[in-house]
Image (spheres, helix red, strand yellow):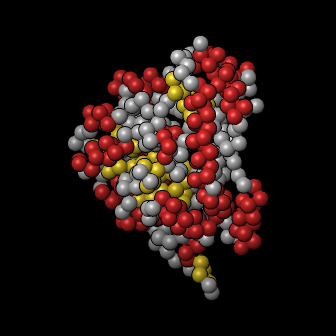
Amino acid sequence: MIPLFRPHFRVEESLESIRGTLEKGWTGQGDLTDVFEDAWSKFVGRKNCVMLNSASAALHLAIESMKIAREWGPDSEVISTPLTFVSTNHAILWSGLVPVLADVDDDLCLSPESVLASITQKTKAVIFVAIGGGSGRIGEIEKICRDRGIALILDASHASGSTLSGRAIGIAFDAVCYSFQAVKNLPTGDSGLLSMLLDGEHAIVKRLSWLGISESTFARTKPGGYKWEYDVEYAGYKYNANSVMAALALVSLKYLNEDNQLRRSMVHQYAKLIGKSASVQIISQSNSEESARHLFQVYVRDRKRVASAMAENRIGIGVHYRSNCEYPMYQHFKEKTPNATHYSEGIVSLPMYIGLTTDEQSKIVQVLVNASL
């Protein structure tokens, strides 16, 4: 069996890292979560990093903190993409705001032209999804928003280690959300991270992520006793990360750049094997050599036939993503997002993980091309 994804852990090193948290007796928030936040801050060149239990939590708190700090009303609109995991757009609804879905380009990232056409007086923010780790036309989107005073949120769930001109993509965005779920480029069991640009919004995130409480339990556990008095300023959420996941993250971070380079090599191999096949369209990524390359995607005319052939040969494939406009709650945006609909009907993600061999890639492409004829 060749799976779509396979988590890759340095097992012995990871176990040793986790062992330290168990021996210390502190497995919750604090201690190693603080260490990882500092390490990630240095890695991406952004301050105000908060490790959380998922990227979904990060997306929610990014919007919620700005809503509170900037006093956005319930009719405020947030522009996003249909080609994403549903939590990206659900996060807008979780904060009681209005999602507006714009169309995508051929690289599957937000189209600047469609974003422009979607802006109204109620537009408060844009969420740019770096699908597969790609940066698309992110610079044009950033200029559109900066010129109009619109907040920018980067969903970097696929983009741990993606850069643009040598710097982390979205480095100047108002919020950047990362995923460290098990099959992502930086794997843990499940966790994420949020980095806010503004200190005030970061402070709100810190409180919201731990039930609105003013200080974490770790911060209140000082030598000589436990401080049980604290303030509760918001009806917050239990979105905090824990030190077991941070222990895994610290090991994975050491190898992230190396692993991403291996992924780029796999992309080159796939492109070489597919060659100029008229029946398979490779989905390109702008600035591909700096992408984290979480995904390798193609477009085929008959996805059901391809899926059947892959299943017969015990090869896993994925769809990233089915357009959110296919779901009843977002279907009213379908007419204005034709490119997203087009790709949603034929896009396929091929296996991508550390340890995938060139022989396995050859088999995958052979089945793909034959089934696509």
Q: Which residue is at the front of the view, 360 or 215?
A: 360
From the viewer's perspective, tell me whether residue 44 is left or right of residue 364: left
| Residue 304 placement (x, y as % from top left) | 60, 17
Total marks drawn?
0
Residue extending furthest top?
Answer: 373
| Residue 326 placement (x, y as % from top left) | 47, 25
Identify whether 134 is placed above or below 251: above
Residue extending furthest bottom?
Answer: 224
Q: Which residue is at the front of the view, 174 or 214?
A: 174
Instruction: Residue 308: name its quadrant.
Output: top right
From the viewer's perspective, tell me whether residue 325 is left or right of residue 73: right
Determine the residue positioned at 68% across, 28% down. Answer: 362
Q: Is residue 353 visible?
A: yes
Identify whether 154 is placed above or below 216: above
Q: Is residue 169 visible?
A: no
Question: Which quadrant of the figure contains the N terminus?
Answer: top right
Q: Which residue is at the front of the view, 231 or 359?
A: 359
Determine the residue positioned at 49% across, 74% down. Answer: 230
| Residue 163 placement (x, y as % from top left) | 46, 50
Determine the residue positioned at 57% across, 42% down. Answer: 264
Question: Which quadrant of the figure contains the C terminus?
Answer: top right
